[in-house]
Amino acid sequence: MNAADLKNILEAVLMTADAPMDINRLAALFEKDPEPVEKTAIRTALSRLQEEYGGRGIELREVASGFRIQVRVECAEWVNRLFDEKPQRYSRALLETLAIIAYRQPVTRGEIEDIRGVSVNSNIIRTLQEREWIKVVGHRDVPGKPELLATTREFLDYFNLKKLSDLPPLSAIRDLDNINPDLFAGIEGYGDPASADPDAVQAAAPDSVHEPGLNPDQDSKVVPFSG
């Protein structure tokens, strides 16, 4: 198979796939061919596709679960006007809780409450779990064995992240009022490493327990969210 045909096939597959596809899944599509396509050839074709999409309204992006073709953030506002359904809205308390889990993981509910200075509503944890943005990854070895919470691969996919180290540094999101509807999208200064593996979790240093600088006095404020 020549490079042009391979590139076109991968483009068609990713345009119709309902979820990101990794290199292994893409390579499996060619297993029945007389000459199976090498993974290196697939990566090369994907790189060329990414270059071709430069400056266009769509992009080929690699996230935690693989590659997908999506609308560029700069065009999302107009694309969203095609749909009658309004973007789901989440409270400031939920966004603060999600941010703490993302940066302090693995973390217990009690530790989240210590950082925020207020109790965590059970509905917040349930909502985050229903969206598959967080999961229980173990239990703290202390009396009561509280659950340890961490973010998921779905969390990374939703926020266009390939790995946890792609999260912006905490200094860039101290003020939640400045977070755009995609929470982390468009914030420059990425590079406060948390992990090189999307499935790995890492606790922050003890002296950084108040690092997020969150304001528990504004729980009632609602922030719009896309997705």
Image (spheres, rainbow, N blue to C red):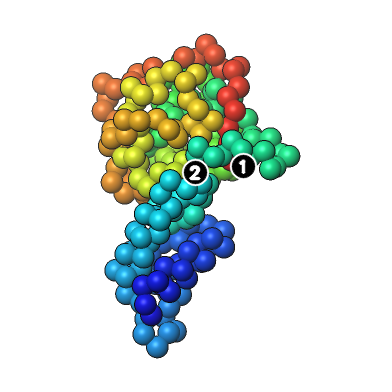
| Residue 76 coordinates in the image, percent (x, y) | 56, 39
Residue type of the residue flagged with mark 2: Arg
Figure quadrant of the N terminus: bottom left
Q: Residues within 10 Å of mark 1 (few under 14, many from 20)?
A: few
| Residue 162 coordinates in the image, percent (x, y) | 37, 47
Residue shown at 31% from the left, 40% from the top:
165
Q: Which mark is residue 182?
A: none
The answer to whether residue 35 is left or right of residue 134 is left
Residue shown at 61% from the left, 42% from the top:
79
Q: Secondary structure at mark 1?
A: helix
Residue 112 lies, with reference to residue 10, above or below; the image says above
Residue 118 lies, with reference to residue 182, above or below; the image says above
Residue type of the residue flagged with mark 1: Val
Residue bearing the label numbered 1: 79
Residue shown at 27% from the left, 25% from the top:
206
Of the pair 199 and 60, the residue shown nearer to us? 60
Residue bearing the label numbered 2: 72
Quarter assignment of residue 39: bottom left
Q: Secondary structure at mark 2?
A: loop
